[in-house]
Image (cartoon, grey):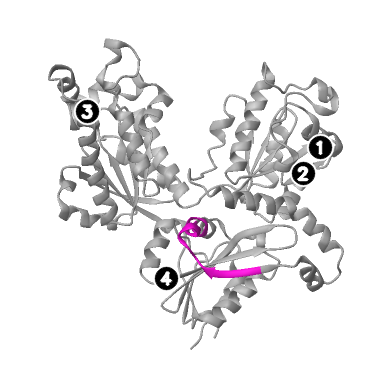
Amino acid sequence: MGEKDVTVVNNSEDSRQESVMLISNITLEPYFSSQLEEIFLIHKIQVHLSVQTYEDFLIEEKKEELDKSDTVILWLDFNTLFPDIYNDFLTNQKEVEETFTGLLAVFCDFISGLCNACSTRLLMFGFEDYSIHFNSIWGYAYSKYNLADRMNRALSEGFSGRITVIDLKQLMAVNGIGDSLDNKLKYRWGNPYSRLLIHEAVQEIYKQYLIAHGISKKCIVLDCDNVLWGGILSEDGMENLQLGELGVGRRFQDFQRFLLQLYSCGVILAVSSKNDLEDVLKMFREHSGMILKEKHISCFQVNWENKCDSLSKISDSLNIGLESMVFIDDSIFEIEAVNKMLPMISTILFEKNTIYKELNSFNIPPNVDLKSVQIRNETYRSDILRQQLRAEYKSYEEYLDNLQMRVTISQADALSISRISELSQRTNKCTNGKRYTANELKVFMDQGLQLSAVYATDKFSELGLVGAIGVQDNNLALFCLSCRALGRNIEEQMISFIRDNYIISEVDFIPTSKNMELKKKLSELVCY
């Protein structure tokens, strides 16, 4: 036995690659390929792009090429596919509902074929009908001829969990419809979209890559004065702050609403403010304009000390890395101090007109497991009780006995796969470094991966699904434990479970900046 028995996989950022296949009935050049490669290269990912026509993929044999790609992008232009469909409605009096049903069936068959042919991540840019110019005839009233929106909704709902449908019309709204369409490109290159629109599209492709791979910040640390409310609490007093449903106060209230949405999707909220703690807690508890409540904040560091020290204490208290944190403050002095002293933390200078765009470092899937989020949030809230219990005992073993920790390891079911995928992607310390998407886990399970979920609870709260073990052909392919569950000997129980149930001949191990302590423990599992 020994560390030499652990298979170390090169995880250099410089070696990351992404194979992308684009299936379309239009050309998106001269901008698409260069912009796609550029945005991934900024983040040290080499993109290999192949472009296939929609007509080719109507041929069954072409679908064999799909599994060679990490991502398949489907971008079909509705108006190019069916240039005369609206005139058929108006001049030939074809039935709209009958036509819609037939078209939907065609697209459903095509997408089903793609899904059956591969386990690859599928993105589809939804249909748009802005170039039809119906508004020139009857204005902007909704009509029965609005097939694009209906088609997008039906495909999104029908293939939920298997294909991600991007709202192309919403992307076009970012820069305006007029600046998103380009007639010169359309008639010269066959590409109806402008360089601006292509830029927004490749940004969205990269965003979906981050979501699929669980690459996201975990925690927002908030200043209070002129961030959560207008004014300075210690000078203006609670009754004179700007916070409410009218005027300037509505701006701060809307920002709190957005933060509450992030919290509900699993983002940890913490507070670092130069104030008196009693005053800030009173604000959270009693001010009628507060959307955020004390229960939503996992850690308060409210004092008159250096904010860099407060941020470090928040990191220690929540057991998360500084690189997982985003700090928001309205003071350029505080922002620059954090940038200099704690450069691992992402900082945002609070500006009312740009704050939402600045918060794009949170990449959360729309189907996030809300139950798991609630359990995780409750764990952070109750950690102060665990810390108080720990202070009562000199011996760590006595503390664990009184914590009444219970661990259950059982076969993973279909409902737990998304959570395990998220866990594998977000964990950096107690992990063998292997990252899996939900689709990859499903495929590997079909190929014999034995996947176990680790659940924990103690006297204060249910911790939920905190870890995972994956073994395939005597190879330990996955070992991960959430940072919030460390320090409870759960990893030791996981290792004992593996030793009791498997003969391990090999361990896949990808080094991260924090997981080298685990390497020796996992190497001891290897049997000759």
Determine the CA span between mark 2 and mark 1. Answer: 9 Å
* Left or right position of 399 against 82: right
Image marks 2 and 1: residues in contact by CB distance under 8 Å: yes
Mark 3 neighbour density, 10 Å: few (under 14) some (14–19) many (20 or more): some
* Left or right position of 73 against 479: left
Determine the CA span between mark 2 and mark 3. Answer: 54 Å
- Which element carries disc 4, helix, strand or loop? loop
- Above or below residue 499? Residue 75 is above
Determine the CA span between mark 4 and mark 1. Answer: 49 Å
Q: How many marks?
A: 4
Mark 1 neighbour density, 10 Å: few (under 14) some (14–19) many (20 or more): some
Q: Which residue is mark 1?
A: 281
Which residue is more in the foreground, 81 or 516?
A: 81
Mark 2 neighbour density, 10 Å: few (under 14) some (14–19) many (20 or more): many
**Label whose residue precedes the other's in the sequence (2 or 3):** 3
Q: Look at label 1 and name its amino acid.
A: Leu
**Label whose residue precedes the other's in the sequence (2 or 1):** 1
Look at the image and give the residue range highlighted in magenta.
407-421
**Label whose residue precedes the other's in the sequence (4 or 3):** 3
**Label whose residue precedes the other's in the sequence (3 or 1):** 3
Q: Which residue is mark 3?
A: 79
**Label whose residue precedes the other's in the sequence (2 or 4):** 2
- Above or below residue 91? Residue 42 is below
Could you tell me residue 240's position as x and y percent?
80, 20
Q: Which residue is mark 4?
A: 449
For the N terminus, give its image quadrant: bottom right
The residue at the point 54 percent across, 41 percent down is 361
Q: Look at label 4 and name its amino acid.
A: Leu
- Which element carries disc 2, helix, strand or loop? strand
